[in-house]
Image (cartoon, grey):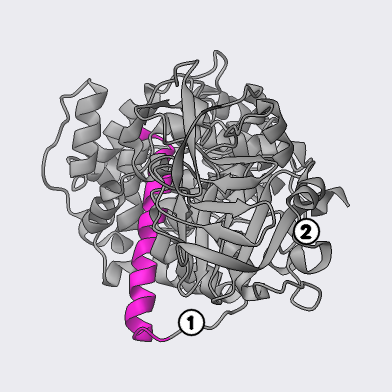
Amino acid sequence: MAEEDYGTFVDWNLMGDLAKSSGPTKVDCKELKEFKQMARQGNWAKNHKLRAQVYQQLIKSIPCRTVTPDAEVYRDIVGEAATKKPSSHIPLPEFVDGNPVPRYCLKADAVASAHRIINCIAGQFPDISHCPSLPAITSLLLHFSKDEAQCFEHVSRMLACNEPGKRLLDQTFLAYESSCMTFGDLANKYCTAAHKLIVATAQDVLEVYADWQRWVLGDLPFSHMVRVLDVYLVEGYKVLYRVAIALLKFYRKHKTGSQGGQNQQQQDSGKIRADIQAFVKGIGSTVTPDKLLEKSFSIRLINRKEITLLQLTNEKSLQQKGITVKQKRRNVQLALNPDTFSSEIVSAKEMRDIWSWIPERFALCQPELLFTTSTHGCSLNRFYSHCEGHEPTLLLIRTTDGDVCGAFLSSDWEERKRGGNKLSYFGTGECFVFRLKPEMERYEWVVIRHPELASAIRPEGQEDSASSEGQNADESLQQPDKPPGDLSPFLAARHFNLNSKNTSMFMAGNFDSIIVGGGGDSNALYIDAELNHGHTGRCTTFDNPPLCKESFQISLLEAWGFQDTMAQ
């Protein structure tokens, strides 16, 4: 019986339908592709013993470090204590960050076994400095283990995984924090409506997204979590991102339905976090485990390689800011103090909304006014002199008709000089354009929305041409060389083989104009030397409609920098 073989720690009264074994009794499969398909279909989801055996097979196949603690190591360390009733009063290591062991369907005293296993792991893995998901993983695997030693071995193998490009658990604060930033980036791109809801209701978006792993590993009901675990052990970490984004989508649908379309008021981030947690814990009443997985895998996410590049980019940005160990994080959204923030174009709330669009690594900064026509006059030379040396920058424009639009510009305007007298495009795919009034909308690099436009590495020597004042210019605009280390690996144009030379024209400038977005018959933004008149139209780089009236007069123009609050 499953109870005898793999149910030592299970309280079967809590298992519900999962206590009834049915379906296949064995899995005859060795190919990873077959395992992937069977895991998603729930081939072993109705048989506890079979699920335990499959987990054992999957975990034993994980490539690990040469010296990885196994069950015998655990028995040697624990010794006679393994036969005694463990105590749940044994405190958990500091690296779990205060996260308790979720009971799920364990016997009450089995939680104490999880405590002992985790403490033994702490002794065998001294390099672990931050692993908040470990209590949940240990509890889950304990449901399918014959004894504590087997559970210890399985968790150890997951921690010791050394397959290139694959990871199962964050083990440092740097990895965990960058995963939260990466989730924010992914939610921003692939879960736009739900992300806008969080931006509109939470004072600190990053604080809310810091819980993303706990939604999956901790808050989900056991019946849902084991279906996620089925796939997670086969496909790895990216599954957690998929499921968390699906949960955010379901949460948004739940809030939209309960609020009846009413405007959301901004609340303390702690309340939003508690609200999401309560929703995820009670998700079983509206969403089945299969429906959750179906939603998760219907999301067209970037592949694992690109997620890894994005993760590494965020890690690098944190390292550059010296954020490598857990510290009391500042309230990033409140860095924009409405009492001290002063813009003649946007309100503090509108600037917060723009801040939610920018790459996560810059969200730790606060806005710094570099240039405004109301103070510095309508001079392109003065605009350059005030903006040079700052990277990135934010351009805001208010027209005489009252429309508001702008652009996030990833590179230093000083780079325009590399093209000599030629009008040369530079920047990276992190640039985007937007409008705030009459309605709020952002337009990213077209390659992000349409990945089929790019693949592999971009050929060298490719030249781009710009359009000026809505007309194609005859002169050639070349992408100036830039050290690879200065680019964002996730969004830099050079990481892509673009099938059109006009899809990577991000920003350009010379003595008589600045241009944002090129390709096609127009520019996303063209501004003259007097910073007085402008033109906007559809361009192939951002595939945007006109951001305001096509030919417009500028009432006010501001340029903002990003001040590193951690450096103060």
Residue 120 visible in the current orientation: no
Depth check: 511 or 303 in front?
A: 511
Q: Which residues are magenta?
A: 234-262
Cα separation between marks 2 and 1: 33 Å
- Among the 4 quarters of the image, the one containing residue 205: bottom right
Q: Residue at x 77, y 42 (%)?
A: 321
Q: Nearer the viewer, mark 2 or mark 1?
A: 2
* Residues tagged 2 and 1 counted as in contact (Cβ below 8 A): no
Q: Is residue 307 visible?
A: yes
| Residue on which disc 2 sits | 371
Q: Position of residue 126 (x, y in %)?
A: 70, 30
Residue 286 vs residue 562, the one in the foreground: 562
The image shows residue 233 at horizontal and vertical percentages of 36, 35
Q: Which residue is mark 1?
A: 264
At label 2, the amino acid type is Phe
In what quadrant of the picture does the N terminus appear? top left
Q: Which quarter of the picture shows residue 337? A: bottom right
Q: Is residue 311 left or right of residue 244?
A: right
Q: Does residue 518 sit above or below 74 in this rendering?
A: below
* Front in this rendered view, residue 365 or 416: 416
User: Magenta segment: does it hold 518?
Assistant: no
Q: Residue at image x 51%, y 57%? A: 535
**Residue at the image position 47 percent from the left and 48 percent from the top:** 523
Q: Secondary structure at mark 1?
A: loop
